């Protein structure tokens, strides 16, 4: 795998700066009271640059940078693993590889998402998209057709286990991964793919 070029690194820094300033302003002023113009000014970019990185103000919080990493990690798991074990290893790999700063930023994003009703409602609507992405990744990993019903059911069960393990705050902390492991262990007893 090649490392990103200068342009890609600059874009990643700009995107991270926009998000960091947005989260800070949301925490200081409140989500509703913060405008895109204020975020752009704090990040030292134009509003049009803001919109090149995030289509809406909501997307600063709703865009989950962890999901693509989890899906990529899943696709790399050995094919002879139980599907739940592949998911668990992917989760451990991604979250175990996050720096303290990345994990703190992810928790801040989750906290803001949970504190704003409109964001929570839109996040619930996005679960269907996430389920589809997970089902596609599992199908690729398992060598099954993308439209395999058992794969979609499995993806829904994994997401349901994740929701069941989510603490009341709606924000995962380091010690909450034990509950997620336990929830996924309950699934590992059955649900064969391809049947």
Image (spheres, rainbow, N blue to C red):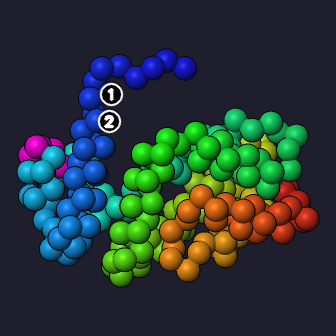
Q: Secondary structure at mark 2?
A: helix
Along the line of sight, which residue is nearer the eye, 181 or 152? 181
- For the point 55% across and 20% down, the residue is 1
Magenta stretch contains residue 49: yes
- For the point 28% across and 59% down, the residue is 23
Q: Residue 8 has which mark?
A: 1
Q: Position of residue 64 (x, y in %)?
A: 44, 55
Q: Position of residue 71 (x, y in %)?
A: 60, 46
1 vs 56, left or right, is right
Using the rendered view, name the quadrant where residue 59 is placed.
bottom left
* Residue 93 seen from this side: yes
Q: Is residue 75 above or below residue 189?
A: above
Q: Position of residue 51 (x, y in %)?
A: 19, 51
Q: Residue 24 has which mark?
A: none
Q: Is residue 42 above or below residue 34?
A: above
Report the quarter where the C terminus lies: bottom right
Q: Position of residue 45 (x, y in %)?
A: 11, 43
Q: Secondary structure at mark 1?
A: helix
Q: Residues within 10 Å of mark 2 (few under 14, many from 20)?
A: some
Along the line of sight, which residue is nearer the eye, 119 or 22? 22
42 vs 135, left or right, is left
Assess whether mark 1 and mark 2 are in contact (beta carbons under 8 angstroms).
Answer: yes
- For the point 53% across and 42% down, the residue is 98
Q: Residues within 10 Å of mark 1 (few under 14, many from 20)?
A: few
Q: Is residue 120 above or below residue 82?
A: below
For label 2, the residue is: 12
Q: CA distance from mark 2 to mark 1?
A: 6 Å
- For the point 45% across and 60% down, the residue is 107
* Residue 145 seen from this side: no
Q: What is the span of residues highlighted in magenta in the rendered image?
A: 44-50
């Amino acid at each position: 795998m090649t490392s990103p070029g200068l342009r890609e690194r600059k874009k990643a820094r700009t995107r991270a700066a926009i998000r960091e300033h947005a989260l800070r302003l949301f925490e200081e002023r409140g989500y509703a009271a913060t405008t895109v113009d204020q975020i752009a000014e704090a990040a030292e970019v134009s509003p049009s640059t803001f919109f090149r990185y995030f289509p809406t103000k909501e997307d600063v919080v709703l865009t989950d940078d962890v999901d693509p990493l989890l899906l990529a990690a899943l696709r790399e798991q050995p094919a002879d693993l139980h599907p739940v074990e592949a998911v668990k290893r992917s989760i451990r790999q991604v979250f175990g590889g996050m720096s303290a700063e990345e994990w703190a930023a992810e928790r801040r994003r989750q906290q803001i998402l949970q504190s704003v009703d409109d964001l929570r409602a839109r996040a619930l609507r996005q679960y269907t998209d996430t389920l589809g992405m997970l089902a596609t990744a599992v199908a690729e990993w398992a060598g099954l057709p993308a439209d395999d019903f058992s794969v979609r059911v499995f993806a829904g069960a994994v997401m349901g286990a994740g929701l069941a393990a989510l603490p009341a705050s709606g924000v995962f902390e380091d010690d909450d991964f034990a509950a997620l492991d336990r929830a996924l262990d309950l699934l590992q007893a059955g649900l064969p793919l391809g049947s």
